[in-house]
DNA sequence: GAGTGGTCTAGACCACATC
DNA sequence: ATGTGGTCTAGACCACTCA
């Protein structure tokens, strides 16, 4: 991105002014001009700075809000989203703690591996680049409920390499934000059905071959780059999901 | 400002003007003032008729568009939605026909039953009111893939009572719209996991006890009233779903 | 009370679809 | 050429938050 003293929105190739403004703000947010959780300038400020009417600014900000990379708070300001914070995976299962507390996590293994072609493609890396492969179990009230296998490109998460397995936090995404400056803004989960292999079944305290729901997740940063591949297994008999159509 | 005159009571009870307008339009659409698929008046018309600015009308219409009960088409007009049309249930499974054709349906049984308390509550009827219970199988390339159990309140669907099982169309919702004047605008699916009983397994050509995904659907008309309860069973090994989070 | 986002106005012009 | 929704302006005032 180039640095300009005066913003130039006048000549978009058939793109609406508010869309251009939204794109400009999007890039600035990704570049870190405003930190996660911080407020972006007030709408009147933006209107003056970019030389557009207030309504145009509002339309641009509404776009970013709809994309989830910004949140408006009446009377306070517009804030860069803090990102997802983890327990959302539980929405696919009926697991519940006594006090509805978030699940804990226990890392079993963390090793450095080389990316295969498909993985590298998804993560925007080159085949053979280094990555961290993490196996962990999520627990609720001390009982294992999910088995997870994470893949994180080392280029973005060098800081995690030396982290002892005992010091990984329960919630991965806030930890990624704090230690590596990466905000997870969006995630996509692919659900399918299968049976547990012996190793995974042992982790979950279930019989081998037990029916299970498999969740393949891709997590994306504010710029839309995929920064995590994750496969999660959970007991199918606890599966439960709600989808709306219109 | 505790007592005294309430500032905003002149036009509405603290509700924004565009929200009031949206509600007004919503009711008119439900009441059938404009048929499904027909255009509502132009924005300039609405602005004049209701005595508000054009921007206010646009905001109200945007609300209805976001709710899916109206669709805007640049240069043509704003149209009342035609409603859902059926094959959407397939999005939970990997089933695919050779030419990606929609599934056919074969009705096995259609009987009149009395609603139990929970069913009546969901359907906005009284306990003991009459309803149609329909068992049907959905087929793809001649192979059974889904087993369905529908519950339709007779009050809304009297026209279906005398319909021979052989004359039910493949797609239920367009048929409901045509024969009963009911538009399905929205549906909610609850997914869970289970095992097939002997009767359902036989319908699907699967062994008894085979793992299956169960989908409990509620379908709603334009006014938000639930007009169908449906339970669908499908082979779990064909299960597949994608969910996005932000 | 100062600053923020939320609502609303009364215009103007543009892009698209249809005749 | 006409009518539709889409964009944009330059204001005004309201509702909320916080010092």
Image (cartoon, coloured by chain):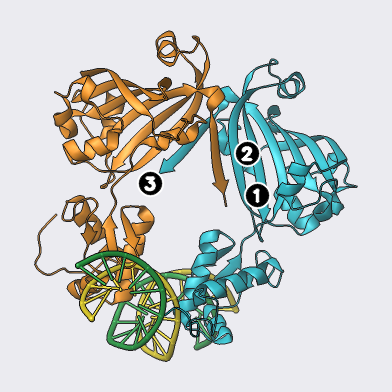
Chain colours: A orange, B cyan, C yellow, D green
Quick one: label 1, few (<14), some, or many (20+) residues within 10 Å? Answer: some
**Camera-side residue of B182 and B138:** B182
Q: Position of residue B132 (x, y in %)?
A: 83, 43
Q: Who's the residue at 78% across and 46% down the image? A: B152
Return the residue at label 2: B101
For label 3, the crowd category at 10 Å Cα-Cα, with few meaning under 14, some 14 to 19 and many 20 or more, is some
Choose the circle earlier in sequence order: 3 or 1: 1
Q: Nearer the viewer, mark 3 or mark 2?
A: 3
**Residue positioned most to the right:** B162
Question: At 63% across and 35% down in the image, what residue appears?
Answer: B215
Query: Which chain does the residue under circle 1 lie in?
Result: B
Q: Is residue B222 left or right of residue B8?
A: right
Q: Quadrant of residue B119?
A: top right
**Which circle, 3 or 1, is nearer the viewer?**
3
Same subunit under labels 2 and 1? yes
What chain does badge 3 belong to?
B
Residue A52 visible? The answer is yes
Mark 3 and mark 1 in contact? Answer it, CB < 8 Å. Answer: no
The image's mark for residue B246 is 3
Residues under numbered marks 3 and 2 in contact, where contact means CB atoms less than 8 Å apart: no
How many numbered discs sit on the rendered protein? 3
């Amino acid at each position: 991105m180039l640095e300009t003293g005066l913003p130039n929105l006048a000549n978009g190739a058939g793109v609406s002014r508010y869309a251009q403004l939204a794109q400009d703000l999007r890039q600035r947010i990704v570049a870190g001009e405003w930190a996660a959780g911080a407020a972006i300038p007030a709408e009147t400020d933006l209107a003056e700075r970019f030389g557009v009417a207030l309504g145009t600014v509002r339309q641009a900000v509404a776009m970013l809000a709809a994309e989830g990379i910004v949140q408006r708070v009446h009377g306070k300001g517009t804030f860069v989203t803090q990102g997802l914070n983890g327990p959302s995976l539980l929405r696919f299962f009926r697991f519940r703690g006594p006090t509805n507390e978030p699940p804990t996590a226990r890392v079993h293994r963390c090793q450095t591996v080389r990316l295969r072609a498909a993985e590298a493609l998804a993560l925007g890396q080159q085949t053979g680049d280094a990555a961290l492969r993490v196996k962990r179990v999520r627990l609720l009230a001390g009982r294992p409920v999910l088995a997870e296998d994470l893949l994180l490109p080392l280029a973005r998460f060098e800081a995690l390499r030396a982290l002892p397995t005992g010091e990984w936090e329960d919630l991965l995404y806030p930890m990624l934000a704090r230690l590596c400056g990466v905000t997870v803004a969006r995630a996509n989960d692919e659900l399918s059905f299968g049976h547990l292999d012996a190793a995974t079944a042992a982790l979950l305290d279930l019989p081998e071959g037990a029916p299970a729901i498999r969740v393949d997740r891709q997590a994306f940063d504010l710029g839309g780059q995929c920064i995590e591949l994750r496969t999660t297994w959970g007991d199918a008999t606890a599966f439960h999901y709600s989808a709306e159509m219109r």
